[in-house]
Image (cartoon, rainbow, N blue to C red):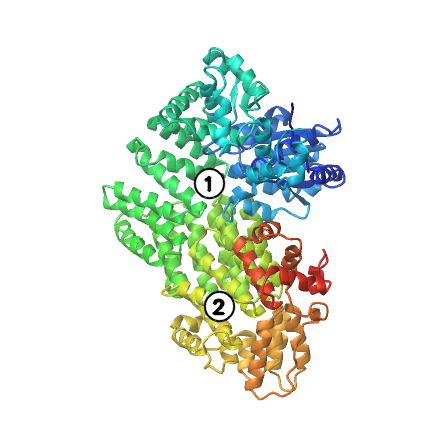
């Protein structure tokens, strides 16, 4: 009897997949097919792809669960189908841009259906390719299909950012668990109770198949036991042969198996009959990853080492420039061969770094440089620095500093130790550990000043200059940055020159010197031209910040959009996340709060530098406060606790402004906010920091506090000078709608209804509350209620995102499912659900949904009714 669950209760998904592929004839499509392990993603794909006719060129590649995959690993499955030049670029480890462009041309020149299976195991280069193709797929007539397991893609998984970046051409298809009815359909004619089977398997199609395959037996407690029991029935050497195949991750060739094991043919045939193996293209592999994982997990350690060693021996030979380097490293480590593990891991790390696969490179370096690795002295210094750089690029700053610190311990002379400490200082700076930067950079400078000028001396000077910039010591930063630039040029160190010039230019800009912007722009160009991608990203970031500090929102957004594209193309997630965070702040200022939400949802929870984490927390707290959402006070307290003790002037100003705004709205103690303001407003740096003074002055004016020392620039200065009307006009021209509305309300005889309406259109319920408080304090009569226009159809004032969440609640989705649907964290989804319950005064989800139904808010257009 043959039992197949691949198409049971999958008609809707098959139709959607078929429609997406057919629709790509007019404009290319991306399809993301998701489902838990065992839900039949690969099966449904093969069923649908087999039905396509000759008009389609179907290519199927899979990411494999090898310990650390090679860059572009799935593309090696497709080499014979690709154009010769693209094939060569992939084989030789060409730059990612060459592979990206070649694959895009390939998709443009034919009607291709490209499937990349199991992207949750994808290497970074492959994920970068998916991101690149997905954003441009509409210019082709091809379909890009990616499958993944949602349970594997948590908030910090690199594929999460890829999913968020894919454009409007993306079709999402999710495979659910089978219902009891589906289990009954599969078990028709068998003496089993579908309800019991469903309860035991939770509707997982793979588990259902395994149970129904032996309906007369007791249900195994785990799938692992079922797999091992089935494999144990194979004749010798069946179980060991199965375990060898499982360790091979992508299987093992029949030629090798028949050569290595007497009687392998009979065992293989029986394993295929028992649905343990499949044989395709001359390779035997486990039919499902759940089978593979079960066999690997049950391997005794000694046997695992022996089998890894056997696979290592089979793979060795003529693979110096092939993707098998990653597999050689994997099997070497599995075999306990530390010497080969070091050699292959180091080769794999450098190969991954060449194509921008920084996560893979970092993992391989970690394996190569573990405590047991027999590292030759002559290679250790370079390898440790390379490892530190790659870990820095994936935001693993602690590990980067650890590798850099090991270099310091290897040095014999003070000069060499100074050079090593300069790099250690730089890695501390990327984590925003200001005191650690000074601790390492100052003695490095002292040691290196006694010798010839060097790249490391310039780097140490640039590190201290950066600390001065962050702490608001602008003039000191300029002096040190200029010195670092001169030394970097003399020693032909363009990366350090870009780094130092960015710092010097940013400091000059703060002091009002127009040469600063020009210097940073030149640093951007030098970084791009010299291939100093990380340093070019920092320069772009600062160029955008200069525009933002000057109040030019459109220019700032353009700079950060450019940075986002650049970092996507070069797999620089740290600067990508930083750019998203700052763009979210630009959108908050511009009144585009929905767009700010989307950027924040990508950023919050990501592992990144302290500065970006704090910035994202502050912006999220500001949005929550301005909207009047529940938990606003707690969000403010979280931010203030996070920045306590920091010397980062920018973080202190943002935190103080948040506290002042919270006090104005009435959700945070005024005395605490005023105390923080008093300690900050006397800082000498603030006298020279015009945008910081403007930010604090706006909220100080609302609370009748003393103004900051020095001239207050921009619209805030106009209001303090008594020209509130001119200030409101200036805010409006700059594109700051909230600031314009609040300031306009302070004009004697102003049209308060218009100001309140503007704020209501933003969903600024918290700001409206604060404005009413201020107007009452100033003795203004006839203050409008300020009801939002949307409340005529939605009297509880849900934001657009909250309306989306309510619509999904009405379909019965859990918080986790809502998070998956909206590509937000489960914690964020939970917050939105709590806000909905609070605004609807509902004690349960059921009551909230009942309120929505009663008011006619359910359905696909719920979100549009609140705009």
- The mark found on residue 512 in the picture is 2
User: Is 28 on the left or on the right of 380, as rendered?
Assistant: right
**Above or below 577: residue 182:** above
Q: Nearer the viewer, residue 68 or 514?
A: 68
**Above or below 259: residue 551:** below
Mark 2 Cα shell of 10 Å, populated few (<14), some (14-19), many (≥20):
some
The residue that label 1 is drawn on is 359
At a point 59% along the width and 64% down the height, the residue shown is 837
- Classify residue 794 by image quadrant: bottom right
Q: Nearer the viewer, residue 680 or 398?
A: 398
- The mark found on residue 266 in the picture is none
Is residue 522 in view?
no
Mark 1 Cα shell of 10 Å, populated few (<14), some (14-19), many (≥20):
many
- Of pointers 2 and 1, the one earlier in the residue sequence: 1
Q: Nearer the viewer, residue 814 or 632?
A: 814
**On the rendered image, what quadrant is the C terminus found in?**
bottom right
**Above or below 378: residue 280:** above
**On the rendered image, what quadrant is the N terminus found in?**
top right
Is residue 512 in view?
yes
Residue 196 place in picture, x, y as percent: 58, 38
Residue 767 place in picture, x, y as percent: 58, 73
CB atoms of marks 2 and 1 within 8 Å: no
**Above or below 52: residue 534:** below
At a point 66% along the width and 83% down the height, the residue shown is 750
């Amino acid at each position: 009897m043959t039992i197949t669950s691949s198409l049971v209760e999958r008609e809707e998904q098959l139709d959607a997949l078929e429609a997406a592929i057919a629709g790509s004839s007019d404009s290319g499509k991306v399809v993301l097919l998701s489902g838990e392990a065992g839900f039949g993603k690969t099966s449904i794909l093969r069923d649908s792809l087999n039905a396509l006719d000759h008009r389609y060129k179907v290519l199927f590649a899979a990411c494999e669960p090898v310990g650390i995959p090679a860059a572009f690993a799935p593309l090696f499955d497709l080499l014979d189908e690709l154009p010769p030049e693209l094939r060569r670029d992939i084989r030789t480890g060409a730059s990612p841009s060459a592979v990206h462009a070649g694959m895009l041309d390939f998709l443009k020149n034919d009607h291709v259906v490209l499937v990349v299976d199991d992207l949750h195991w994808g290497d970074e280069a492959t994920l970068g390719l998916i991101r690149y193709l997905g954003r441009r797929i509409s210019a082709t007539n091809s379909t890009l299909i990616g499958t993944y397991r949602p349970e594997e893609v948590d908030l910090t998984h690199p594929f999460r950012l890829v999913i968020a970046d894919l454009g409007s051409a993306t079709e999402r298809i999710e495979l659910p668990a089978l219902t009891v009815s589906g289990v009954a359909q599969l078990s028709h004619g068998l003496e089993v109770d579908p309800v019991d089977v469903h309860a035991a398997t939770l509707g997982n199609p793979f588990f259902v198949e395994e149970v129904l395959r032996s309906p007369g037996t007791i249900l195994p407690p785990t799938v692992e036991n079922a797999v091992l029991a089935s494999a144990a029935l194979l004749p010798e050497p069946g179980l060991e042969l199965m375990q060898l195949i499982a360790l091979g991750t992508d299987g093992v060739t029949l030629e090798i198996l028949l050569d290595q094991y007497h009687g392998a043919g009979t065992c293989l045939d029986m394993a295929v009959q028992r649905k343990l193996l499949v044989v395709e293209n001359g390779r035997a592999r486990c039919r499902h990853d759940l089978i593979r994982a079960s066999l690997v997990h049950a391997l005794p350690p000694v046997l695992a080492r022996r089998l890894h060693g056997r696979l290592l021996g089979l793979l060795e030979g003529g693979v110096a420039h092939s993707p098998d380097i990653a597999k050689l490293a994997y099997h070497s480590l599995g075999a306990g061969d530390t010497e080969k593990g070091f050699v292959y891991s180091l080769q794999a790390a450098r190969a991954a770094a060449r194509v921008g696969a920084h996560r893979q490179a970092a993992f391989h370096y970690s394996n190569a440089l573990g405590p047991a690795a027999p590292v030759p002295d002559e290679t250790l210094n370079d390898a440790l620095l390379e490892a530190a750089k790659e870990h820095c690029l994936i935001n693993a700053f602690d590990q980067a500093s650890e590798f850099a610190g090991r270099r310091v311990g290897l040095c014999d002379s003070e000069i060499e130790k100074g050079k090593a400490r300069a790099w250690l200082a730089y890695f501390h700076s990327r984590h925003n550990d200001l005191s650690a930067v000074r601790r390492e950079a100052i003695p490095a400078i002292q040691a290196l000043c006694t010798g010839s000028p060097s790249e490391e001396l310039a780097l140490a000077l640039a590190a201290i200059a950066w600390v001065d910039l962050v702490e608001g010591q602008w003039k000191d930063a300029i002096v040190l940055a200029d010195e670092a630039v001169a030394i970097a040029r003399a020693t032909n160190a363009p990366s350090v020159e870009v780094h130092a010039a960015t710092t010097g230019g940013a400091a000059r800009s703060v002091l009002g010197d127009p040469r600063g912007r020009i210097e940073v722009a030149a640093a951007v160009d030098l970084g791009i031209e010299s291939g100093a991608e990380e340093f070019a990203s920092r320069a772009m970031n600062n160029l955008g910040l200069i525009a933002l500090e000057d109040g030019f929102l459109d220019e700032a957004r353009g700079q950060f959009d450019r940075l986002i594209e650049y970092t996507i193309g070069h797999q620089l997630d740290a600067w990508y996340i930083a750019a998203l965070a700052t763009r979210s702040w630009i959108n908050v200022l511009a009144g585009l709060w929905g767009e700010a939400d989307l950027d924040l949802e990508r950023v919050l929870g990501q592992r990144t530098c302290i500065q970006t984490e704090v910035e994202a927390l502050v912006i999220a707290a500001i949005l929550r406060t301005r909207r009047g959402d529940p938990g606003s006070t707690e969000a403010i307290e979280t931010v203030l606790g996070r920045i306590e003790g920091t010397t980062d002037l920018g973080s202190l100003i943002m935190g103080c402004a948040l506290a002042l705004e919270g006090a104005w709205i009435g959700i945070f103690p005024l005395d605490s906010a005023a105390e923080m303001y008093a300690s900050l407003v006397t800082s000498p740096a603030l006298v020279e920091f015009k945008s910081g003074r403007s930010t604090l002055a706006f909220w100080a004016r609302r609370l009748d506090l003393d103004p900051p020392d020095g001239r207050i620039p921009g619209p805030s200065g106009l209001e303090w000078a008594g020209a509130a009307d001119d200030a409101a006009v200036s805010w409006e021209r700059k594109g700051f709608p909230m600031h314009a509305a609040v300031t306009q309300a302070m004009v004697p005889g102003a049209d308060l209804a218009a100001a309140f309406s503007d704020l209501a259109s933003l969903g600024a319920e918290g700001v409206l509350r604060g404005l009413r408080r201020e107007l009452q304090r100033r003795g203004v009569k006839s203050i409008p209620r300020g009801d939002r226009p949307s409340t005529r159809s939605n009297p509880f004032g849900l934001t657009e995102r909250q309306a989306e969440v309510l619509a999904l609640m009405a379909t019965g989705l859990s918080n986790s499912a809502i998070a998956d649907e909206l590509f937000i964290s489960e914690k964020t989804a939970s917050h939105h659900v709590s806000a909905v319950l609070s605004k609807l005064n509902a004690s349960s989800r059921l009551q909230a949904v009942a309120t929505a139904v009663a008011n006619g808010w359910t359905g696909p257009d719920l979100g549009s009714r609140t705009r």
